[in-house]
């Protein structure tokens, strides 16, 4: 179910993860996922990995028909309110061509801290962003 949501959300925004990839990530140590429901159906989900004092956003996806209605923000607010007290920073990478996601992350108070040229399999550059809890 989450794989189909991911596919819908990422169809024009980068790499789609299939069910197997999502399952492999979910069993890794430190990985947590939250699912937002609308009318009892998954509207979006956020997957994060935490190691020691750092968290990394692995993916966030909201069903296209429900985007721009506060689902993504609600997922991040939930994550931030459940974050472990020893976490100082949250990191993520976003494709330079995905301007809507970049604006979304800026609205959640992430700031650009660098770039990774050729980070994605199609050669696209990634913007590295960080949220500070200090
Ligand atoms: C990025 C994504 C998770 C945002 O989720 P969302 O539920 O649509 O976002 P929200 O409605 O919570 O938006 C919160 C704020 O982010 C900003 N924002 C979100 N989408 C935006 C867009 N397309 N353009 C500009 N700003 C945007 C706005 O400031 C918005 O507040 P506002 O609607 O009051 O102006 C969602 O668009 C998505 O799944 N995109 C496809 C997958 C993807 O790109 N994931 C991230 C890859 S790293």
Image (cartoon, rainbow, N blue to C red):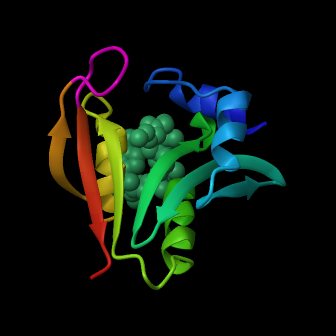
Quarter of the figure with residue 119 = top left
User: Does residue 68 appear in the picture of this structure?
Assistant: no
Image height of 21 relative to 69, above or below: above
Please identify the residue farthest to the left as the structure is shown: 114
Q: Is residue 56 left or right of residue 111?
A: right
Quarter of the figure with residue 18 = top right
Q: Residue at x 44, y 71 (%)?
A: 52
Q: Is residue 114 left or right of residue 48?
A: left
Bounds of the magenta segment: 118-125
Give coordinates of residue 50: x percent, y percent.
Answer: 50, 63
Give coordinates of residue 49: x percent, y percent.
Answer: 52, 57
Q: Is residue 1 magenta?
A: no
Q: Quadrant of the N terminus?
A: top right
Identify which residue, 13 or 127, lies in the foreground.
127
Quarter of the figure with residue 16 = top right
Image height of 131 relative to 15, above or below: below
User: Does residue 83 appear in the picture of this structure?
Assistant: yes
Please identify the residue farthest to the right as the structure is shown: 40
Q: Quadrant of the C terminus?
A: bottom left
Image height of 63 relative to 87, above or below: above
Q: Residue at x 28, y 36 (%)?
A: 99
> How many marks on residues?
0
Give coordinates of residue 130: x percent, y percent.
Answer: 27, 60
Dominant secondary-structure state across the stretch colored magenta = loop
Q: Is residue 122 magenta?
A: yes
Q: Is residue 31 left or right of residue 58?
A: right
Identify which residue, 122 or 100, lies in the foreground.
122
Identify which residue, 50 or 36, lies in the foreground.
50
Identify which residue, 123 or 30, lies in the foreground.
30
Q: Residue at x 33, y 32 (%)?
A: 98
Give coordinates of residue 93: x percent, y percent.
Answer: 33, 43
């Amino acid at each position: 179910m989450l794989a189909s949501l991911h596919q819908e959300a990422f169809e024009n925004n980068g790499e789609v993860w299939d069910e197997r990839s999502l399952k492999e990530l979910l069993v890794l140590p430190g990985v947590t996922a939250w699912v937002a429901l609308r009318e009892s159906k998954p509207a979006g989900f956020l997957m994060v990995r935490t190691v020691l004092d750092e968290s990394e956003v692995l993916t966030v996806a909201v069903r296209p028909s429900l985007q721009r209605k506060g689902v993504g923000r609600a997922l991040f607010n939930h994550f931030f309110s459940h974050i472990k007290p020893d976490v100082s920073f949250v990191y993520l990478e976003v494709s330079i061509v995905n301007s809507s996601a970049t604006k979304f992350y800026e609205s959640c108070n992430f700031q650009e801290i660098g770039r990774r040229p050729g980070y994605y399999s199609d050669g696209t550059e990634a913007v590295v962003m960080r949220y500070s809890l200090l």
